[in-house]
Amino acid sequence: MQFSVDWLNQYLQAPAETDRLAERLTAVGLAVEGREPSGVDTLLDIDVGPNRPDCMNYLGLAREAALALGTTLQPPSVDVPDRPLPSDEAIQIRIDPAAAEACPRYVGLLIEGVEVGASPQWLQDRLRSIGSRPINNVVDVTNFVLWETGQPLHAFDRDRLTDRQIVVRFARPGETMTTLDGESRRLNEATLVIADERSPVALAGVMGGLESEVTGRTANVLLESAHFAPTAVRRGATRLGLHTDASHRFERGADPEACLSAAWRAAAMIQQIAGGNAYAALVVDSGKLPPTLHGELSVSRLERFAGLQISRTDVERILGALGFAPDGGDSEDRVGITVPSWRYYDFAQTAPDGAVWFADIADEVMRHVGFDAIPAEVAAAQGPDAESAPSYRRRHRLQDHLSASGYLEAFNYAFLSESESEAFDPLFDGEPLRLANPISERYELMRRSLLPGLLESALYNLRRDAAGVQLFEVGHLFASSADGEAVEHEAIGLIGGGLSALPWDGGRKIELIDVKGAIESLAAEFGVELVARAEARSGLEPGTSGVWSLAGGSDPVGQFGRLSGHNEQEALFAAELLARTLPAEIPLKAVRIPSRFPAVVMDLTLTHSLAVSWTELTEAIEALRPSLLADYHLKVRYRGERVPTGAVATTISFVYQSDERSLTQDEVNEKHLALLNELDRRFAVHDEEVGG
Amino acid sequence: MTSSSLPPSFESTDLDALAREFEQQASGITERAEWDALRVEWLGRKQGRLRTLLAGLGELPAEQRKAWGRGVNQLKQTVEERLEGLDAELRARERRAERLALAEDVSLPGRRPHIGRLHPVTLVTREIETIFRAMGYSVAEGPEVEDDFHNFGALNFPPDHPAREEQDTLFLEGGLLLRTHTSPVQIRTMMQRKPPIRIICPGRVYRNDNDLRHSPVFHQVECLMVDRGVTFGHLKGTLEAFLTRLFAPQTRVLLRPSYFPFVEPGAEVDITCPFCAGSGCATCSQSGWMEILGAGMVDPRVLAACDLDPEVYSGFAFGLGVDRVAMIRYGFPNIRMLFDNDQRLLRQVRA
């Protein structure tokens, strides 16, 4: 919000130099974020928090500045017009009971016989300096007073109000009104309006109506200076998409006690500039004016809370200058305070006993004592806190494992378009969560799979001439449960394709088993055995895709396969695993001491139909498992010359070993031959069988 | 000279000539095979020429036999020594040849193992975690989809308050929302256990904001300490301990009063600009300072919402944008590049 230094200085006994003003305002919490020269003046861009509507005007800002600079606030003196209204018919004001909360007070002040014209140059300059366009002397005064006091005012042409009536009420269904900006607006029951006898003439606290505006022909002006509740103004303004200087202040909480003084100030200025005679203000209260809040501050508690010695004198000086009217209280330690009306809304949510919260008052003192005056101190350690979240410990381990496996960690947005969301099958039930206010169509749904994001990242890199892609991501997936709750699943995604490294560095084409193996290795690291089975999955080439389940279970906990549905020449492979498959706690396991006796390794090459899966072979080996077989592993798979079409030669290494003795070749031969013969009998194919 | 099965004619055999002949043969040898052949020709067990010279020795008279034998033995010794010498020469030559065959161009690039890397945001988050864990903090986590109570209500955002607008919330159909900060994790922790509480809450947060400086997805680490007697001085001390470790040890920390609904007093925290160490540069608009995080004493309304008595407990909290620190640290010019997953960039970042 922009403020003129020159204008602000009008309210300070000792005018402040710009640099020091900026520095001091920033130090007490009114951050000066920019400055801009404007003739001989300077405009300050001040970040006024939504809790400080009282500083969104010159007097309020000057109150803080005066204390921060060590000078005194000089408010303008105001004459109170006390001439009684000529008759009851001059103006009538009523607050509809239904609007009592929304409009606790309405002050109307009648000025008869004004001469509407252009404002004097100084007033026009003031308004222009803060980017406000001068309109006429009456309207300009209301704008000036808003900026001076923070109280939004509105001027009606009294003679254009039907029956000279003012009613504060909620709009009726179907009512419309043309606002000052020329827009015709359809109102509803949530819109608080100022109406005359017939129809709305202003949107309360937001904008006036075109039909009752002050023009060159206006002679008699009714000044409105009302207090509207924040929510009432906010609902009306938001629904109509309006945001004005007035609504900005009311929404954040105007000063309930400022209605009269601001009306008087405006009346005095209008009489001075536009002539006319002001009458005594007409004050209508709904009985719902905010109460005055009281509290007290224990100086010793303040010292303990801040970690700084503060004298009672300083506490009273600061609170006094800010309008908290500190009183002696009945003890040495306690200072009684009254919250000034302009700070009501910031303090309104009081403690259960109705008193102002300690921290709220402490803040006022501490920011004026200065945060830099408070010595830094490290809190005494009390030993470690509770155990960290299991999800966090698990993530650490799996990120380390996957990066050690050669994969780069990717971060994708959690949003997907409709088509991306449908491209892959999630590993869990539930509809995608839909954003109510998405940033764009591309980001409408929350992801149920990491694969769309990883695919996009892979394509991004391939389009930039990457020879290969190896990325992983760990992140949350989202879905709605059957009863409409949101459910989150952490998942691990992996994508690979192209060369695993530069050719010189031993890079080779990444295959499905590379990506699958990375996840299986990860699971093994966590002591988990995954069982894979073929299954058709959306987004994955048929015949290459599968799911994992845990040994002994059948629910899919992961999926993998060659990605389909992209135009890259390079084959891409992906895998996804639910993180909960991996335990956060891995029980420590003692190492297995290797046998002292030599092992006998025997290879077996079996040429079998491609239809025989590795799972079938291993199941057969397990079933036949000879007593001295310590281990076996897949060595080579070969298809080509000397292997019939439709078959594959699988070479398996068998390791025979005993913990107790050296084995003789003869006893190993005997066992191995028996195994070999049985496997051969069950699985082997010969040329004639396939070739036929 | 050819080998003969006949007994040697001792008179006609000139041992000196034989020695010269051997030497002539030996001097031309360069290959192991030639050496082998030479050895067999002269020293061979059955047909070696020196052996045949001794074949008819028994027929000679005793005194002649002695002289002949001495002469042949001398020749044999000469041949053996010469062959040994040749053998050593050949072995040396062979070793040289072997070494030559093994020689490498040592300037060739070594074959490097293919390693992966963690995302810059992960690296910075871990660094922050390490700093706080050393101070006794634990790590707390929570859901990214939240309800109004945990994201706003309990954090003293009154309904319909403009402070909510500043959060640029992304809402889900049905009324839930994507958390705009990790503060809901603080709320969940305070509702779940009693002080002393010292936690940090790292995680993803979401805002309806999308330009070069703002990403709709970004990452925070928030810190919370609640106990009896926690002071604003403790907040300052903890911030200094943290920020001087995360940035340079000589980093200065400045707190300015500011407003956040969930803290009172609240502060914006500036550090001396990490790029110019406070002397002023383009990044800090010549100010020498950089706004780095928001902090404050936990608002009593927040404590009360979590069923903690503000008359008994006090606490501090602060929150830091991790992506921004990652950008500063690794020189990413805009936040969106952190989400491109460009391998050329990801390969360069390290802890």
Image (tube, coloured by chain):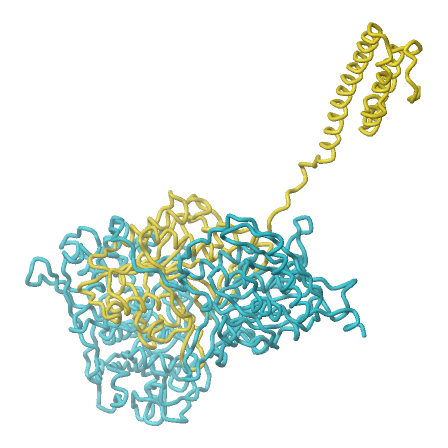
Chain colours: A cyan, B yellow
Whole-percent x, y for residue B215 in the image? 49, 65
In the picture, residue A190 is in which quadrant? bottom left
Q: Where's residue B67, x and y in %?
A: 82, 7
Figure quadrant of the C terminus of chain A: bottom right
Viewport quadrant of the N terminus of chain A: bottom left
Find residue A609 and report its image quarter: bottom right
- From the viewer's side, name the closer residue of A535 and A563: A535
Up/down of A388 relative to A106, above or below: above
Tell me the residue at 39%/93% (across/down).
A173
Q: Is residue A37 visible?
A: no
Image position of A584 with respect to A559: above or below: above
Residue A638 visible in image: yes
- Tell me where residue B166 appears, x and y as whole percent: 39, 69
Q: In this view, does B31 lie to the left or right of A229?
A: right
User: What number of labels is visible?
Assistant: 0
Residue at 25% of width from left, 90% of height from top? A97
Tell me the residue at 41%/45% (across/down): B248
Q: A140 or B293: nearer the eye? A: B293
